[in-house]
Amino acid sequence: MNPIRLALVEDDPEVRELLRGYLCRQPELNCVLVADSVEAFLAELPDLAAAPQVVLLDIHLPGMSGLDALPIIKQRLPEADVLMQTVFDDADRIYRALCAGASGYVLKNTPLADIKAAVLEVVSGGAPMSRAVARKVLAHFKPSPATQSDLLSEREREVVQAIVDGLGDKQVATRLDLSVETVRTYVKRIYRKLQVSSRTELVSRHARGQI
């Protein structure tokens, strides 16, 4: 079998050379492009004799971020798998990356041998993820008790709807004819019941039909 054509996009010189030094020496892999930014990657892409099959893409990059670049890369390389690599393991970035077409998501503290295994896995149709990332994904999509219609009171559901509509505490108070302090009490109670910690998470769960 021919070596897998791999592209690396990483701005940290030390990490980039570490990846290059290990991955590019593996007989199963052929590093066809190594770049320090998305802009450099896209500029060099037309000069390649053959397009990469896997792109190992850092999320936090100077200029265009890996997340912002992902749809562009998928458009330019529709047959390629993009494996995200980052120090970030928060659910929002993971969710955005997967929705944008990432085939896998590994953390930068992942051992080099495991990163190689992830590249091989993604080519075989897998969706490799670091264990910590997998746990975040499972938690993100796990049905919550908030799907129960009787979890929130009618007034609490009205507060949730106002938050989803983008209203701040004072605006919620005006809409529902409540004091601001009462609204804040409702918000704390809602957070506790739904096990969320921010308005962003609340809106996200509502959008997924969990509230």
Image (cartoon, rainbow, N blue to C red):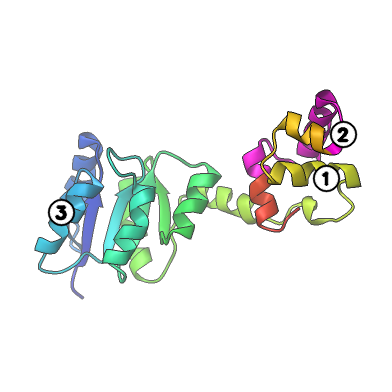
Give the CA separation, mark 3 to mark 2: 57 Å
Q: As shown in the figure, which amino acid type bears the numbered disc 1? A: Glu
Q: Quadrant of residue 158?
A: top right
**Nearer-N-terminus badge (3/1):** 3
Placement of 8 over or under 169, stated as above or below: below
Helix, strand or loop for disc 2: loop
Q: For the point 86% across and 49% down, which residue is it?
A: 151
Q: Tell me: residue 21, above or below residue 53.
A: above
Q: Position of residue 136 (x, y in %)?
A: 57, 48
Q: Is residue 110 visible?
A: no
- Tell me residue 173's x, y (percent): 81, 32
Q: Is residue 116 above or below residue 152?
A: below
Q: Residues within 10 Å of mark 3 (few under 14, many from 20)?
A: few
The residue stretch that appears in magenta: 176-202
Q: Residue at x 68, y 51 (%)?
A: 205
Residue 158 bears which disc, if any?
1
Residue contact at pointers 3 and 2, CB within 8 angstroms: no
Please state which amino acid type lies under the numbered disc 3. Answer: Ala
Residue matched to label 2: 177
